[in-house]
């Protein structure tokens, strides 16, 4: 009997310290102490604890697919370094840790991990996909000093990520606030660096490869919003 109870607990889809977040186009497992709110067309998820909310953030957004939205375009963009203004206006080059296409719960995604691509010293994991006429971007960011603190929660969030958008979703704008095809996904904001982050030096075995950067139209125009959201929690 004890073995059976243990097996039931092991196979339970969601633990007591997690909850299921769901909007019109995706669902995933979220830490119980986190909340998500809709800010314009972006869903912003963070801890209820004000200190933790400065260290990490999850942002979800979606738009109507345009001519520049494709898996190949997303992968190409995420294989390109970004240059940010660090402390004392010294440039900081992002570090590309990994970029690949993979399936999560039988749906294809471009999955990438960068350091200092949005704010110096923050890791950001990017998950981008397309379903029918909808492009979806999920970003999970955390300060590199505390990344291991959130790694398990982020792993559960990613592995439980499911696309639930229906084909007629775009005809129900009240239920799914998404950007139209002709608009960007976020404001082009150049936020000041939060005081407690600083410009982190590159890891010893991870030297930047190139200083070339570019921005494609479409889904990745949301990325500047991440730094702004982190700054608001200061």
Image (cartoon, grey):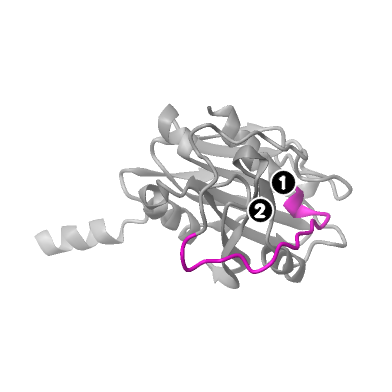
Name the residue: 86% across, 50% down. 181
Name the residue: 66% across, 59% down. 128
Left or right side of 29 for 210: right
Q: CA distance from mark 2 to mark 1?
A: 9 Å
Name the residue: 40% across, 46% down. 146
Residue 25: x and y in percent read 64, 50
Name the residue: 56% across, 71% down. 103
* Residue 61 against residue 131 in the figure, above or below: above
User: Closest to the observer: 129 or 124?
Assistant: 124
Q: Residues within 10 Å of mark 2 (few under 14, many from 20)?
A: many
Residue 26: x and y in percent read 60, 51
Where does the magenta region start and end? 203-222
Left or right side of 11 for 34: right
Q: Residues within 10 Å of mark 1 (few under 14, many from 20)?
A: many
Q: Does 70 appear in magenta?
A: no
User: Closest to the observer: 102 or 168?
Assistant: 102
User: Closest to the observer: 72 or 65?
Assistant: 72
Q: In terms of sequence position, does the residue under pointer 2 or pointer 1 come before the other?
A: 2
Instruction: Name the mark on residue 89.
Output: none
Left or right side of 165 for 185: right
Residue 159: x and y in percent read 47, 61
Residue 211: x and y in percent read 71, 62
User: Closest to the observer: 6 or 155?
Assistant: 155
Instruction: Name the mark on residue 222.
Output: 1
Element assignment for label 2: strand
* Residue 119 against residue 7 in the figure, above or below: above
Question: Residue tagged by mark 2?
Answer: 137
Disc 2 and disc 1 in contact, CB within 8 angstroms? yes
Quarter of the image for residue 73 reads bottom right
Element assignment for label 1: helix
Q: Quarter of the image for the N terminus: give it.
A: bottom left
* Residue 56 against residue 67 in the figure, above or below: above
């Amino acid at each position: 009997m004890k073995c059976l109870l243990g097996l039931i607990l092991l196979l339970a889809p969601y633990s007591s310290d997690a909850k299921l977040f769901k909007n019109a186009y995706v669902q995933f497992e979220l830490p119980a102490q986190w909340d998500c709110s809709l800010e314009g067309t972006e869903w912003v998820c963070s801890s209820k604890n004000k200190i933790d909310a400065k260290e990490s953030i999850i942002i979800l957004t979606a738009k109507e697919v345009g001519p520049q939205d494709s898996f190949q375009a997303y992968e190409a963009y995420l294989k390109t370094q970004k240059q940010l203004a660090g402390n004392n206006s010294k440039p900081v080059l992002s570090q590309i840790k990994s970029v690949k296409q993979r399936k999560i719960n039988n749906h294809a995604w471009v999955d990438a991990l960068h350091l200092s691509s949005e704010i110096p010293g923050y890791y950001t994991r990017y998950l981008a996909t397309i379903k029918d006429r909808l492009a979806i971007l999920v970003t999970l960011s955390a300060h590199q000093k505390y990344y291991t603190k959130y790694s398990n929660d982020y792993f559960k969030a990613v592995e439980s990520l499911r696309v639930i958008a229906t084909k007629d979703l775009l005809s129900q704008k009240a239920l799914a606030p998404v950007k139209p095809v002709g608009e960007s996904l976020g404001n082009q904001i150049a936020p000041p660096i939060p005081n407690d982050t600083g410009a982190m030096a590159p890891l010893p075995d991870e030297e930047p490869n190139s200083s070339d950067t570019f921005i494609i139209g479409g889904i990745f125009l949301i990325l500047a919003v991440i730094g702004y959201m982190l700054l608001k929690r200061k």
